[in-house]
Every structure is written in structure tokens, then in C-alpha cells.
Image (cartoon, rainbow, N blue to C red):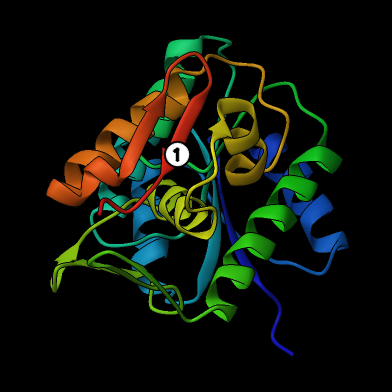
Amino acid sequence: MDRVKVLVVDDESRMRKLVRDFLMRDNFDVLEAGDGEEALDLFYREKDIALIILDIMMPKINGWDVCREIRETSKTPIIMLTAKGDENDELQGFELGVDEYIAKPFSPRILVARVEAILRRASHMAEEECAQAGGIVMDKAAHLVTVDGERVELSYKEFELLSYFIENQGIALSREKILNHVWNYDYFGDARTIDTHVKKLRNKLGKRGSYIRTIWGMGYKFEVNG
């Protein structure tokens, strides 16, 4: 069976080697890029990259701009690395469609565990072909959503969030529960991460966005009107 291909992007060669060695030990195939420009060239040339580990501060093209460009055409999962501990950076990353956000220094074993968790979620989503609710249809294998027959473009996390809502129709879901299931790890940041994603998801769903109801002081409930 072909090995899963991961693209590691960082301008520090020692950091790339550290991440590469741990990933290869777990049987991943690793590609490396030392700046954003090289990363985009590799991404467009290699058609089977399953996940990207991306540093923010890089020459030529920074991580934010690399992520922004990739998200215009692809839902490939992205883990963002940064030396900063700024919560605003984290929120910006999630806004751009980043799937995980890890601050340096970090444990390489934890990074590999996050990579495997994200790929498992992506694989699990592909196994379940279709879900629908009140005019919303999700083709999980094709990562495609239509609302009343019209295609809607969702980020990776928005897609997972909508899937989780549809799977739990009529159930009040706390922010903590949503974070643990959709982000799949204990998140210690601000709940604005959830609220930001819900706001964007509602807007993209149009009138069907009203299915996502706010439970004040707790979280959200997905319920088809009427």
C-alpha cells in the first residue's frame, strides 16, 4: 500500500529534519519545502499530498498566504506551526481554514499524533457517503455540499462542523463538546473559535442557516424548521 504523503514547510532545516524523522518513523512519505514559494510549487506538482505542516514566518511567501492560496482550490488538511503564542494568530489560522495550530516548541510525538488523528477523521468522513437535512445535502466522499441544489463551498472545519450538527440533530451541544469532537483534542483557547465558524457556516447556508440555533450560555442545536 502506498505511504501517505505529508508536506513539511519550514525555513529552518533542523526543524524540517526533526519533523521528517518522526513522520518517516511512522511510515509517512515526507516532502520538504524551505519557503512558501517552494511549498506551493510542490503542492501543485504533487497531486496526492494528504496533509501539510506549515510554518507561519517564512521568506518569499508566508504561511498565512500559502494557506489562503491552497484553500482557494483544496481542502487538504493543514497544521500550522508558529513560534508565537498569540491567540489572535490561532483565531486567524482557523479563519483561514487551518485544521490544527501548534506553537513551538512542541513534542514531535504529539505532532505525529495530531497528523494521524486528522487523517483518521478525513478517512472516516470519506467512508460515509451522504447525509441530508432540510434541503442540505452532504456528499462526504466528494467533500461536496449543496443547499437547495446549489453548491456551497465550505472550509475543511466548516464541513466537519456541519457534519457533526447533522449527525446530532435536535441535540443541544455545548461548545466544549463541539470542540472535542470536531477539533478532536482538548482546546484551551477562546470559545470564539466555535462562534466564528458557526457564523460563517450560517452565512454560507443562507436561509438554511437558521437550522443552527444558539443555546445561550451553552452552545448550539441543529434543528430543521417545520
At 49% from the left edge and 26% from the top edge, which residue is drawn?
219
The x and y percentages for residue 46 are 44, 73
Relative vertical location of residue 135 with respect to residue 21 in this rendering, above or below:
below
Left or right, 28 with reference to 155: right
Quick one: 167 or 62, which is closer to the camera? 167
Residue 90 image position (x, y, % from top left): 48, 22
Q: Is residue 124 above or below residue 184?
A: below
Element under disc 1: strand
Give coordinates of residue 136: x percent, y percent.
27, 65
37 relative position to 26: left or right? left
Is the C terminus in the top left, top right, bottom left or bottom right quadrant?
Answer: bottom left
Which corner quadrant of the image does residue 117 belong to? bottom right
Which residue is rendered at x = 85% and y = 63% of the image? 26
The part of the image, by quadrant, that contains residue 108 is top right
Query: How many numbered dots are placed on residues in this image?
Result: 1
Q: Is residue 130 above or below residue 109?
A: below
Q: Position of residue 82 (x, y in %)?
A: 56, 24
Question: Residue at the spot x=31%, y=51% of the render?
Answer: 71
Where the N terminus falls, by quadrant?
bottom right
Extreme residue toward the front, this view? 226
Q: Residue farthest to the bottom? A: 1
> Dot 1: few (<14), some (14–19), or many (≥20) neighbours within 10 Å?
many
Q: Which residue is found at the position 46% from the left and 47% from the top?
A: 161
Callout 1 amino acid: Lys
Residue 160 appears anywhere in the view: yes
The image quarter in which residue 116 lies:
bottom right
Horizontal side of 223 relative to 54 (left or right) equals: left
The residue that mark 1 highlights is 221
